Amino acid sequence: MGLFDWLTRRRKASVPAPAPAEPPAPASEPDLEGQWRTGVEADTVWSIDPDGTRRAAPIDALAAIAIETSDYGPDGRGAWWLFYGLDEDIAFTLPLGARGEGGMVEHLAALPGFRHHTYAAAVRSPEVDTFVIWQRQLD
């Protein structure tokens, strides 16, 4: 028995083919963020949740705005806007990616003291954290 006999037997041995990879199952739930709406009207920030409930707060009645991120990744999933009232309690929340968010961000970014670098870090963050992107200046 030579070296080539061993190779011939080895080549003839059947090797089971790997099972074909199954495509990922389609998402069974619609995108949560897309079911929310937000905007700013007359210096009032508002949101409407998937159930149709509207929440709003005048910017003059806000103490701070933050973004709370999760470890789902930097694509915005699981990240939430937090709007704090003057009593330092949360006035309302909404997920990043809500319809109308671009216009809302544009308005909020014009507020004095808006932390553009912190906002950029928050929307890219893959970590669990809370980023305060705006805080009312104390007199």
Image (cartoon, helix red, strand yellow):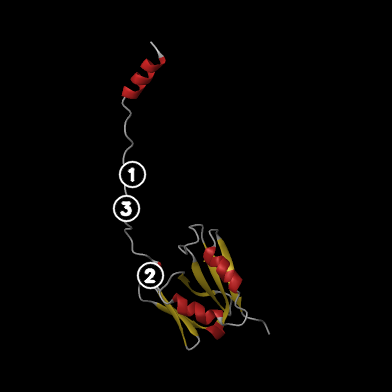
Which amino acid does the dot numbered 1 rest on? Ala
Q: Residues within 10 Å of mark 2 (few under 14, many from 20)?
A: some
Q: Amino acid at mark 2?
A: Gly
Which class describes the residues within 10 Å of circle 1: few (<14), some (14-19), or many (20+)?
few
Q: Horizontal placement of 125 versus 4: left or right?
A: right
Q: Please tell me whether mark 3 sits on a helix, a strand or a loop.
A: loop
* Kind of residue at badge 3: Ala
Q: How many marks?
A: 3
Residue 47, percent across and down? 43, 77
Vertical arrangement, residue 41 with respect to residue 134, above or below: below
Residue 57 shown left or right of residue 37 in the figure: right
- Looking at the image, which residue is at 49% across and 68% down? 80
Whether the residues at callouts 2 and 1 have beta carbons within 8 Å, the answer is: no
Mark 1 = which residue?
21
Direction top: furthest residue: 1
| Residue 103 percent coordinates (x, y) | 46, 80
* Label 2 – label 3 distance at C-alpha: 20 Å
> Which structural element holds mark 1?
loop
In the structure shown, which secondary structural element does the residue marked by tag 2 occupy? helix
Q: Earlier in the sequence, mark 2 or mark 1?
A: 1
Q: CA distance from mark 3 to mark 1?
A: 12 Å
Mark 2 — residue? 34
Mark 3 lies on residue: 25
Check the picture and name the quadrant holding the N terminus.
Answer: top left
Of tags 3 and 1, the one toward the viewer is: 1
The answer to whether residue 98 is left or right of residue 122 is left
Q: Quadrant of residue 119?
A: bottom right
Viewport quadrant of the C terminus: bottom right
The relative height of residue 111 versus residue 21 in the rendered view (above or below) is below
